[in-house]
Image: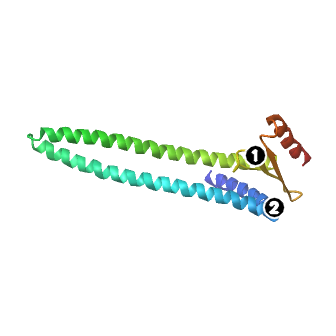
Amino acid sequence: MGNLSENFDIQDLMSYGDDLINLLNVKNGFEVVSQSFDHLKALHFACDEDFSQIQGSIQDCKKKLDACKKKTEESYSDFSAGDDIELVANELKDLNAQWTSIDEQRQSMKRKERDDLRAEKKLSMYASVTKVIPKIDDPSKISGYMVDREKRVIEKFQFETDKMTAYETCNSIWSIINKQ
């Protein structure tokens, strides 16, 4: 059964390869793919930095937790150290709270990576279906490229959101799509 899944994935990748080759053959196609790749690299770099920071925090917490456990064991061995036990218990509570916070950050980072991957796949699907590759770097404009792989044409479009209603913008985009 794993072989069928691998074959399906390879066939999918090969079909995307044809689209990518056609896109790269177009004059501005490489710039679009290059820009998307740069955004992806920046996202991965940011995630790696966050992951490293969280890993460092986890290691620090583990060291502090081990030190507290050692202090607790030492305190239990000496019954006269009642005040020390209370201090260690408070320290343990603080460390457990820090551990919980770090774990929540780690889970949040994993969710963000998963959401970013889903958004990237969605964007790729939209581009395949509508032949539109949006540019999302300027929120005051709706812009992107219309790609037609059969005709090997890339048409750039841009709409100023403050000069058109959402309805007019939507109709203009549909007009461009319908021209193809």
Say above or below: 98 vs 37. Answer: above
Please name the residue shown 20% across and 40% down the image. 87
- Position of 81 with respect to 172 (left or right) is left
Query: Regarding mark 1 in the picture, which secondary structure is present there?
Result: strand
Q: Nearer the viewer, residue 133 or 140?
A: 140
| Kind of residue at disc 1 | Lys
Q: Within the image, what quadrant is residue 122 found in? A: top right
- Position of 73 with respect to 57 (left or right) is left
Please name the residue shown 54% across and 44% down the image. 111
Say above or below: 22 vs 69. Answer: below
Q: Which residue is outermost to the right?
A: 179
Characterize the local packing of mark 1: few (<14), some (14-19) or many (20 or more) Cα atoms within 10 angstroms: some
**How far from the left and from the top, in percent, is residue 113?**
56, 48
Please name the residue shown 78% across and 51% down the image. 144
Q: Nearer the viewer, residue 74 or 134?
A: 134
**How far from the left and from the top, in percent, is residue 133?**
76, 51
- Position of 158 with respect to 7 (left or right) is right
Name the residue that disc number 1 marks.
Answer: 141
Please name the residue shown 57% across and 56% down the image. 44
Name the residue that disc number 2 marks.
Answer: 22
**How far from the left and from the top, in percent, is residue 53?**
44, 54
| Kind of residue at disc 2 | Asn
Disc 1/disc 2 C-alpha distance (Å): 27 Å
Q: Which residue is outermost to the front?
A: 163
Q: Nearer the viewer, mark 1 or mark 2?
A: 1
N-terminal of the pair, mark 1 or mark 2, is: 2
Query: Regarding mark 2 in the picture, which secondary structure is present there?
Result: helix
- CB within 8 Å, label 1 to label 2: no
